[in-house]
Amino acid sequence: MKPHSLFIIVVFLSGCSTMYIPSAPNIPLFTEKKETNINVGLSTNSLFLSGGYAVSSKYAMIISSSLSYGNFGKYYDVGDLLYSGGEITFFYGGSFKHRNIELGFGEFYSYYEFGVLEFYGGLGYGNAIVSNKIYENNYGSIFFQVNNGLKKTNFELGGSFKLVGSYLFYYYPDELIDGTYQNTTMDFPVISCQLGGVIRFGNENFKFFISPGLNLSKGFFNADRDDLGEGFSNHETFYTIWHLSLGLSVNF
């Protein structure tokens, strides 16, 4: 691959100083009442825990939570480990310490012999802050998600489409007065479209999994982005575009 081609790919997959990191795809693929699914793993920028519980033969609840690596040390994402010479890296999580949680409820259906279709809606909350606490983002969100997959005893394959509406409250230094920046808050809505997938393999109760995710977000700003600083200046991408997760899935 030519160097300039690699450069274009890296820029496309990067998000500088991201204050919005989407959750790892949560695709439990339920088929029966009282079924429980728990997933724990590492993504390219966060530790995460997700899962769900089928409360009946038709309805289920799901939950997911993540905590970015910046909460534990100087490395904010896998990109910091792979490439420490600059800001353009794969899987870039930015300089924000991020955490979030989502709760959802919905229906699941089995079709043909191995097919599973799921519909979920729910709410979420997230927080992102830089280490010196000058810049901070808090947001609430609402989502609708469709999962579709194939489920066998030793192998599962699933995909998801997720539409998320969020409202961000961004805290940043605005005006320089007497040599000190005065902090202010700007709030704005964001619409996100997320595609996810999962491959799980193992035995009936324990499986390893790999799960990629793609996120595209659109913010509706009421101020000049170049005035907002960290996460926005020079029209930086304020959200993580692409992430990859690995871990262990338990089903019982």
Image (tube, rainbow, N blue to C red):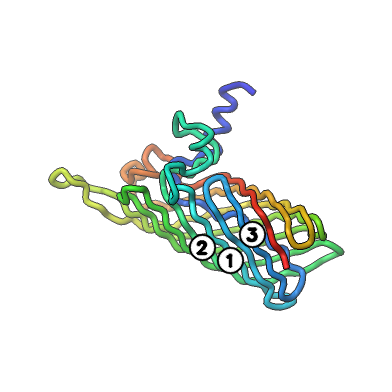
- Residue lying at the far left of the rendered structure: 178
Could you classify mark 2 by the number of other residues whose Cα lies within 10 Å: few (under 14), some (14-19), or many (20 or more)? some
Relative to 232, 150 lies left or right: right
- Residue labelled with disc 2: 101
Q: Which residue is mark 1?
A: 63
**Residue 213 location (% of width, % of height):** 61, 49
Residue furthest to the right in view is: 113
- Where disc 1 sits, the SS reads strand
Q: For the residue carrying disc 3, how many other residues have a C-alpha within 10 Å: few (<14), some (14-19), or many (20+)? A: many
Q: Residue at x 58, y 59 (%)?
A: 49
> Which quarter of the image is occupied by the N terminus?
top right
Q: Residues within 10 Å of mark 1 (few under 14, many from 20)?
A: some
What residue is drawn where x is 43% and y is 40%? 236
Q: CB of mark 2 within 8 Å of CB of mark 1?
A: yes
Q: Which residue is mark 3?
A: 39
* SS type, badge 3: strand
